[in-house]
Amino acid sequence: MMRTIEARLVAQHGLSANDFEALVHLSHADEGAMRRIDLAEQLRLSPSGVTRLLDGLQRAGLTCNKSCETDARVTYAMITDKGRETLREAAETHAAACEELIGAHLGEGDLDDLAGLLDRLPGVGTVEPGACAGPQ
């Protein structure tokens, strides 16, 4: 299922699943920016892994670096306007793929039950029935 979703994201938007997830995290962050080390933790990547990921997103103009005003050692990753637009489009692709691969096989009550179960897991946050993680 994840390979199918990622294949669609790559084909239609040039985004890997990790790219998409990084943009989602950045879009939810204050001012669209996160410390790179915090983003690495959220994505379960090493610091060098998040650097490689962000290098690609920066080359595409989807993110940029932002310096910390109080600590020159800290660099933030920040989503750009182009990144937000790309994420909006990719979120539609992601939601359609989720609906096709999951929603088409579950009834409305099943989706409500699934959302309730996911909501009880630590670190998942509130899941609304029929909603996929998208930009804010």
Image (cartoon, rainbow, N blue to C red):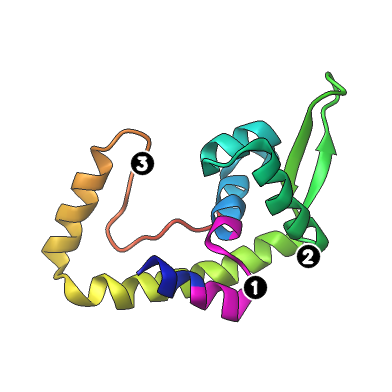
* In-image side of 112 versus 43 (left or right): left
Few, some or many residues within 10 Å of mark 1 (<14, 14–19, 20+): some
Q: CA distance from mark 2 to mark 1?
A: 9 Å
Helix, strand or loop at label 2? It is: loop
Q: Main secondary structure of the magenta part?
A: helix
**Which residue, given by chain and number where applicable, does mark 3 sit on?**
124
Magenta segment: 7-19
Q: Which mark is residue 14?
A: 1
Q: Position of residue 25 (x, y in %)?
A: 56, 46
Q: Is the residue 118 above or below the residue 19 in the image?
A: above
Q: Amino acid at mark 3?
A: Val
Q: Amino acid at mark 1?
A: Gly
Labels 2 and 3 touching (C-beta < 8 A): no
**Which residue, given by chain and number where applicable, does mark 2 sit on?**
60
> Quadrant of the image for the N terminus?
bottom left
Q: Is the residue 112 above or below the residue 70 in the image?
A: below
Q: Amino acid at mark 2?
A: Ala
Few, some or many residues within 10 Å of mark 3 (<14, 14–19, 20+): few
| Camera-side residue of 33 and 37 | 37
Q: Is the residue 49 above or below the residue 7 in the image?
A: above
* In-image side of 115 versus 92 (left or right): left
Q: Position of residue 45 (x, y in %)?
A: 57, 42
Residue at far top of view = 70
> What residue is shown at x 60% (from left), y 51% (from top)?
22
* In-image side of 1 versus 39 (left or right): left
